[in-house]
Image (spheres, rainbow, N blue to C red):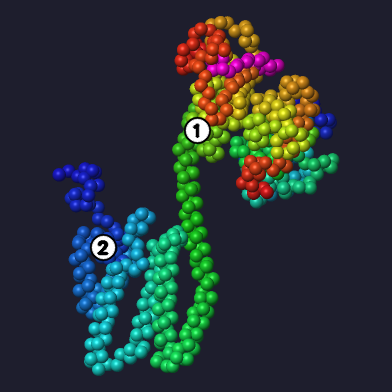
Amino acid sequence: MTEPTGPVPIRLVLVDDHRMFRAGVKAELDEISAGRLEIVGEAGTVDRAVEVIREQQPDVVLLDVHLPGGNGRGGSDVIAGSAGVTTRSGGPVRFLALSVSDAAEDVIAVIRAGARGYVTKTISGPELGGAIVRVADGDAVFSPRLAGFVLDAFGAAAGEIAEVDEELDRLSAREREVMRLIARGYQYKEVAKELFISVKTVETHVSSVLRKLQLSSRHELTAWASARRLL
Amino acid sequence: MVTSPQTARGPQGAAPRRERPPLRRASEGRVLAGVCRGLADHLGLHPLALRVGVVILTMVGGAGALMYAFLWATMEPEEHGPEARSGRRRWVEPGALLVAGGGLVMLLGIAALVQGLGVNLRLDITLPVLVLTAGAVFVWSQLDTTRRDRLLAQQGTDRRQALGRLVLGLGLAVAGLVALGVQGGSLSQLRDVGGAVLLTMAGVGLLAAPYVARLWRDLREEQAGRIRETERADIAAHLHDSVLQTLALIQRRADDPVQVARLARAQERELRSWLYTGPVGHAATLAGAVAAVGHEVEDLHGVPIELIVTGDRPLDADGQALVNALREALLNAVRHGAPPVSAYVEVGRSSVEAFVRDHGAGFDPDEIPDDRLGVRESIVGRMQRHGGTARVRRLESGTEVSLELPVATEGRPETRPAAGPETPPASGQETGPRTGPEGAEP
């Protein structure tokens, strides 16, 4: 995992409609955090989550994709409802989606709504801790499954490669390589070693893919998003 | 004779004593509204006898007609499938024509009789009233409960038919009212009264419209509610058969964590594929076969595998070889490696690549003793025989097996010889047909 970000702990809000799951995550994070993480609030519904986020101004929100309340769009509604809220130090609040759902439209919807990453609920405690730290630093967190979705959605698996990096509808060759390694179960550190680049460069590539995922108008993505009434 | 279920279900009359059908208006084999038919079915009589009886009773002071009307109003219509109702649907039922004609003749007869007795019938009033009544009957006949459902179903022909009846009924009613209002006056009077009647009807329609619309909406909601209820019942049934059963099993095996984890994992997968119909198709595609193999290995060893597949193509013999090699690699990973185990299969245009990675201490492929066929034969050899390659890499933490198989581009089914001549098998053991022994590792 990455180094602790400093003496100030990361302020965290847990949003999940299963109380038992929240308790489990809390226990796991307490065990591994060693003072780096501080859980400042919890919520089980969209409306309560927005309230807590406005009140606490956390650094990171751990967000379930499916939640009751709001406009029925779960995690995406929380992100929309918390627009404009800043952390205590004035930065943007980061969202990390945490879900049991494997459905592409759920994942894409919450990412396009503004989440900085997506991990599955089967993630181990230390890995989750690492993902939270990474998101708090403004980096993107991709699970292998999300990387797989991205490769599929951008046609990268079928060999579609962007000619210029700025192209929004396709991945660059390097981005594709990074995504493929993440899909193969490599940690960022291992990806960096494999491609002879720095971890920071890997993070840059992943963030760039996240940006494409959020902004691209590729029809697969827009179809998934419009199925969730995001557009 | 003993009644076996077979004879009881046989053709009518074959069974000695059938269950008495409920008293329902018949939808098939009826003349008018199906009252006589339904009654006859219920009582076990011949419908013709009942019909004749009703007609005779009608002749004698109209008691038959009254009885018929009462039964029509009170008897529930029979439930029937859509194919049954489409059989005899005509604009006007012949039976109805028959009865209408008979009734008209009877009315004329009675009128002549009464007139003959010296009573003034005032035909100028009674005739319009009769026309009005006929119109009302046409309109009200649309309220029949079975037709309501059909109207809601929005079937083209039925709707047009219903509309036709409605217009006819309304036309008759207006004509009757106008005739009543004019009472033999002049032509200009006819126009005035006609206008007044139409205006009144328009007003009444305007006032009634919100209620009608409300009623319509309620009906729609009720129908939607029924559909939702059915869906909910389906979901409940599925959850009961799958999730609840597994939960019960887990409670019974609570002391065996390996079993519990396996059950939970299998159930999770089943539920996922039911909810999201899975990221992969059926087993006849490469992605489907890969998923099936991944699940099989998970079930065998109870170790979760993060399996990601992108792209897909039809499953051919070479693809099957890759799947078999992948299975072996997965088995090695869950047996000798440490979790998390991840597998990534990318089906590209020109090649299929597969990666299996674990986090164990790792091993050096060159140090494997020759008698361990797992890697050497089942993975490397198999891939080579099908024109592909296999590599085993030792990472900082864990091992990664990567498989690559070039595939034919679409439209040109590549016919590669069973044993690729350019890549002779690692050992001379499996040169013949491709269907080598599965799981060669002892």
Q: Chain of mark 1?
A: B
Quadrant occupied by the N terminus of chain B = top left
Residue range of the region highlighted in magenta in the rendering: B382-399
Q: Which residue is mark 1?
A: B282
- Residue B393 is drawn in which quadrant? top right
B273 sits to left or right of A105: left
Reply yes or no: does residue B52 show up in magenta: no
The residue depicted at 38 percent of the width and 70 percent of the height is B141
Q: Amino acid at mark 2?
A: Arg
As drawn, the residue found furthest toward the front would be B412
Give the percent coordinates (x, y) of residue B340: 63, 23
- The x and y percentages for residue B297 are 53, 23
Residue on which disc 2 sits:
B37
Does any portion of residue A140 appear in the rendered image?
no
Estimate how packed mark 2 is, as few (under 14), some (14 to 19) or many (20 or more) residues with alpha carbons within 10 Å: many
Q: Quadrant of residue A9?
A: top right
Q: B350 or A3: which is nearer to us?
A: B350
Vertical position of residue B302 compared to residue B159: above or below: above
Check chain identity for marks 1 and 2: say if they share one.
Answer: yes
Q: Secondary structure at mark 1?
A: loop
Answer yes or no: do the residues labelled 1 and 2 have beta carbons within 8 Å?
Answer: no
Instruction: Give the CA separation, mark 1 to mark 2.
Output: 52 Å
Instruction: Give the mark, 1 or 2, whose residue is nearer the N terminus.
Output: 2
Whether residue A156 appears in this view of the structure is yes
Left or right? Give the position of A6 relative to B389: right
Chain holding disc 2 = B
Residue drawn at x 50%, y 65% as measured from the top left: B216
Q: Is residue B317 above or below residue A104?
A: above
Q: Which amino acid type is shown beneath numbered disc 1?
A: His
- Name the residue rendered at 41%, 87% in the picture: B180
The numbered dot on residue B424 is: none
